[in-house]
Amino acid sequence: MLYLVLALFLLALILGPQVWVRHVMHRHAADRPDLPGTGGELARHLLDRYGLTSVDVEAIATGGDHYDPGARAVRLSPGNHDGRSITAVAVATHEVAHAIQHAQGSRLFALRTRLARLLGTVDRIAMVMLVTLPVVMIVARVPVLGLVQFGAVVALLGLGVVVHLLTLPVEFDASFGKALPILGSDGYLHPDDMPAARGVLRAAALTYVAASLTGLLDFLRILRVIR
């Protein structure tokens, strides 16, 4: 019973943030004909307003909403690019805020970008080490070596969560230092809609942390298959 309780607690800890983020986004994704434009249209307007005319706004089917500093493009999911909802408007403004951070030369944003690129390499290395773990143990016949490799895999995968936690200031600045004031004080949303926008922006700031926790669950699934 104790192991079952611990397993359920771990599952809730890993999946809880992701479920909460999706719930908040879906809750405020209803079409609002009274809003003056779609998320994509607002993103284009804000980029032009802040002099970022060279930054593109694109609709993408996969990859999630994000700002790509290498391509200098704000990329939005179809629902947020073409949608006319609180979620679409808030998410679009959050991603535009990252473009503003980039243009302003934010050191934290630059650090986050470098770490994100590093994490892609780290994840690939971790997966290769995990998949080859049984082979190493069979060939080397040294249990300690297998344990060391397994520990390295756990550390590498856990690094993703740590990195996203360390870069949370970048996400919260995008949501609450830039996007929320733009939507509120500049009159893009009615005051009655601001609490909903705040909730969506909070979820947007925690999206990467929630996704990295879900990655740990994928690791546990792979480990079960190997065993």
Image: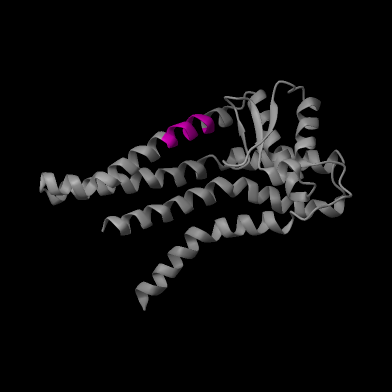
Residue in the picture at 64% in, 47% down:
204
Which region is colored magenta? 112-120
**Rendered location of residue 25, percent (x, y):** 68, 54
The residue closer to the viewer here, 19 or 177, is 19
Q: Can residue 98 be seen in this view?
A: no
Which quadrant would residue 221 be assigned to in this image? bottom left
59 lies above or below 15: above
> Residue 92 appears at what percent x and percent y?
72, 40
Q: Is the magenta stretch mostly helix, strand or loop?
A: helix
Instruction: Give the quadrant of the N terminus.
Output: bottom left
Side of 178 relative to 123 (left or right): right
Task: Report the residue at 85% width, 38% height from top.
Answer: 186
Does residue 182 appear to the left or right of 65 in the view shown?
Answer: right
Magenta region includes residue 114: yes
> For the C terminus, which image quadrant?
bottom left
Q: Residue at x 76, y 44 (%)?
A: 89
* Along the line of sight, the residue nearer the viewer: 12 or 26: 26
Q: In this view, does 17 lie to the left or right of 178?
A: left
